[in-house]
Image (cartoon, rainbow, N blue to C red):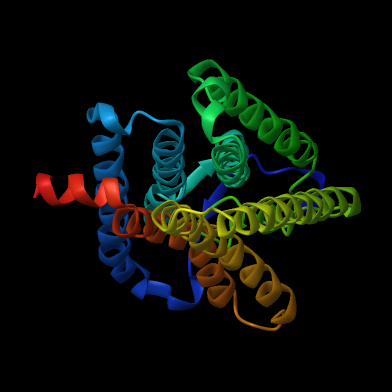
């Protein structure tokens, strides 16, 4: 008889295997959230307050870290509520909104990495015209295109999810409204939702990796041909920082996707942990990479402390 109705209110249940011990996770994840906010916010503060850092590369870095803060803010508070039996209720509308922002921010994050590659490409191949090409208006336009493209990719997935009837249960065994976690509660044919979700994710990742690989291959090749040893070392060092962030973002996402599909018999807690890994690890690691490896930011951090 429950198949004749469609639930519009759900209960998030993060790490259900821990049962009553789930409340013990509130403190460590709260501390992790505070560290993410502090580390990312500190570098954003330095970039925004120091006029010498008002350059496209540093602006893109601060934008990437701002996206990290937004991602953690979208995920962690809902995660903390899911560990409680009193505050873990969420409406279908809020669930779809959270799903939209999670996937939008993940895609926007990847698109910012593409803009960073474009910025370094222009800086290496057109050094004398760099300031003429990468103006503030151009940068704002590129960021707008990246944001619009992210919305255009995520929107069809959310629209399809909103049309599904959720009749099996109203308990989401996850700490966020991930697409597949919500689809498990559906009744009826959701093959279109699965196909669209997988196609968008795979095609976007493959296209991003191809563009990033082609860009940085040419950038590194051109950097080795720079006659000045100091300029060559600086260009390679900067590209190295970007490549570390790319490896962190795409490595965590791809590895979690592979493990998720290979370890189908694993418990729901394992899948929850994998999701937490790919959602939060980049938010924690990215500010460390840019803070430690970017000389100008590192110098201002030293002065600040």
In the picture, measured across the screen, residue 277 lies left or right of residue 51, that is right
Residue 178 in the image: x percent, y percent? 62, 53
Name the residue located 72 percent from the left edge and 79 percent from the top edge. 264
In the picture, measured across the screen, residue 79 lies left or right of residue 181, that is left
Task: Tell me if residue 276 comes above or below residue 291 in the rendering.
Answer: below
**Residue 273 visible to an observer of this rendering:** yes
Quarter of the image where one finds residue 80: bottom left
Residue 18 in the image: x percent, y percent? 43, 77
In the picture, measured across the screen, residue 187 lies left or right of residue 136, that is right
Residue 224 in the image: x percent, y percent? 57, 60
Name the residue located 49 percent from the left edge and 58 percent from the top edge. 236
Question: Between residues 103 and 131, which one lies in front from this camera angle?
Answer: 131
Question: Between residues 88 and 146, which one lies in front from this camera angle?
Answer: 146
**Residue 84 visible to an observer of this rendering:** no
Task: Tell me if residue 20 comes above or below residue 266 in the rendering.
Answer: above
Q: Which residue is farthest top?
A: 137
Task: Tell me if residue 299 comes above or below residue 136 in the rendering.
Answer: below
Question: Between residues 19 and 281, which one lies in front from this camera angle?
Answer: 281
Count of numbered badges drawn on the protein: 0
Name the residue located 55 percent from the left edge and 70 percent from the top edge. 274
Name the residue located 73 percent from the left edge and 59 percent from the top edge. 184
Residue 301 in the image: x percent, y percent? 18, 49
């Amino acid at each position: 008889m429950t198949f004749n109705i469609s639930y519009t209110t759900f209960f998030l249940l993060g790490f259900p295997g821990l049962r009553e011990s789930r409340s013990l996770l509130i403190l460590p994840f709260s501390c992790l959230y505070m560290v993410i906010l502090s580390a990312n916010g500190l570098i954003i503060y330095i970039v925004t307050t120091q006029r010498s850092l008002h350059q496209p590369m540093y602006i893109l870095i601060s934008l990437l870290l701002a996206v990290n803060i937004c991602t953690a803010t979208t995920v962690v508070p809902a995660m903390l509520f899911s560990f409680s039996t009193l505050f873990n209720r969420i409406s279908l509308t809020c669930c779809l909104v959270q799903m939209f922002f999670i996937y939008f921010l993940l895609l926007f994050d990847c698109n910012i990495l593409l803009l960073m590659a474009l910025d370094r490409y222009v800086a290496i191949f057109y050094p004398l015209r760099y300031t003429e090409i990468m103006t503030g208006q151009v940068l704002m336009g590129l960021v707008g295109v990246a944001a619009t493209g992210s919305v255009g990719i995520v929107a069809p997935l959310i629209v399809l999810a909103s049309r599904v009837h959720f009749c099996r249960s109203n308990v989401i065994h996850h700490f966020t409204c991930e697409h597949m976690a919500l689809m498990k509660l559906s009744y009826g044919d959701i093959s279109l939702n699965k196909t669209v979700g997988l196609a968008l994710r795979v095609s976007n990742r493959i296209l991003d990796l191809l563009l990033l690989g082609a860009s940085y291959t040419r950038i590194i090749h051109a950097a080795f041909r720079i006659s000045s040893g100091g300029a060559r070392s600086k260009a390679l060092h900067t590209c190295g920082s970007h490549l570390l962030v790319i490896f962190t973002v795409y490595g965590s996402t791809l590895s979690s996707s592979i493990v998720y599909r290979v370890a189908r018999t694993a418990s729901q807690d394992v899948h929850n942990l994998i999701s937490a890994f790919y959602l939060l690890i980049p938010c924690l690691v990215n500010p460390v990479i840019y803070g430690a490896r970017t000389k100008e930011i590192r110098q201002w951090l030293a002065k600040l402390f």
